[in-house]
Image (spheres, rainbow, N blue to C red):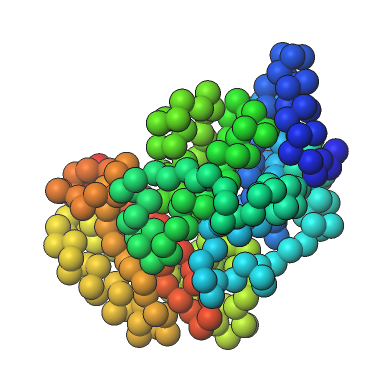
Amino acid sequence: MDIIRSPEQMQTRAADYHRQGRTIAFVPTMGSLHAGHAQLVKLARQHADVVVASIFVNPLQFGVNEDFSRYPRALDSDSELLLQHKADVLFAPAVADMYPHGTAQTSFVEVPELANELEGAHRPGHFRGVATVVAKLFHMTQPHTALFGEKDYQQLLVIRHMVRDLNFPIQVISVPTVRDADGVALSSRNAYLSAALRARAPLLYQTLRHVKEQVQSGVTDFAMLEKQASSDLQAGGFVPDYLTIRHAHTLAAPQSHTENLVILAAARLGETRLIDNLQIGPI
């Protein structure tokens, strides 16, 4: 596996692959890799001749007082995981290489409306930072396919809309959330949890499952379900930012339980903010 740090070198390598007629699958990450990332790389191998993974902790998507400075970084162990799962290239640029004129002076990519809901409302500017860095990474890696986990569901929709609106010739592939045995969605931020808080963490997934079961059983009072689920989380020691049932493709408020729906939640457990979701097909 080659490690490339220069954006220019990455673009040259990608152009070489294209000239050779080789297809590229891209897995963008912020590092601190786990089994969920490994699954993305494994599936990427099935979709292309070459697998490129990136590791870049993007300052643009972190707000004031968020965890950019302490976000876990483990390039050596991350490289070992990527090598084990047969990635061909690790692209690991520095902030100064990605934003040579500074983050305050860079051009931005924004996805209107969708990026201002839920996570966007609670983390202003977050999705502008995500869309901007992913667009830059797409230009540098020139992939035919790109794989994203469904745990960051709203992010997945934002990327899909950006790819559509900006005519990127890229197939976006979504990969189901990988979970621990107790249902907790794998996340690099889970490392922040103490043992006592980690023992409480499964309640988030359990609550989402309960809401899903209620909807599937025919309950149509979504507002009541949302309120009760938030109360259940609070009783279990969480501080919810939101728990909501939305249309799975637009994140609009649903008109009926026969639509494709998704339950999305974000809640703090101690100092750690966890997000999760469950999709519900038409009933």
The percent position of residue 229, horizontal first and vertical second, equals 29, 72
- Residue 69 on image: x %, y %: 66, 70
- Residue 216, image x and y in percent? 24, 53
Q: Is residue 113 above or below residue 64?
A: above
Q: Quadrant of residue 170?
A: top right
Residue 235 seen in the current view:
yes
Left or right: 48 with respect to 213? right
Residue for point 67% across, 72% down: 70
Residue found 17% across the figure and 55% down from its top: 218
Q: Is residue 59 above or below residue 52?
A: below
Quadrant location of the C terminus in the rendered image: top left
Quadrant where the image shows the N terminus: top right
Q: Quadrant of residue 225?
A: bottom left
Which of the 4 image quadrants contains residue 89? top right
Is 113 on the left-hand or right-hand side of 3? left
Q: Is residue 85 visible?
A: no
49 or 170: nearer the viewer = 170
Q: Is residue 163 above or below residue 84?
A: above
- The residue at 57%/51% (across/down) is 105
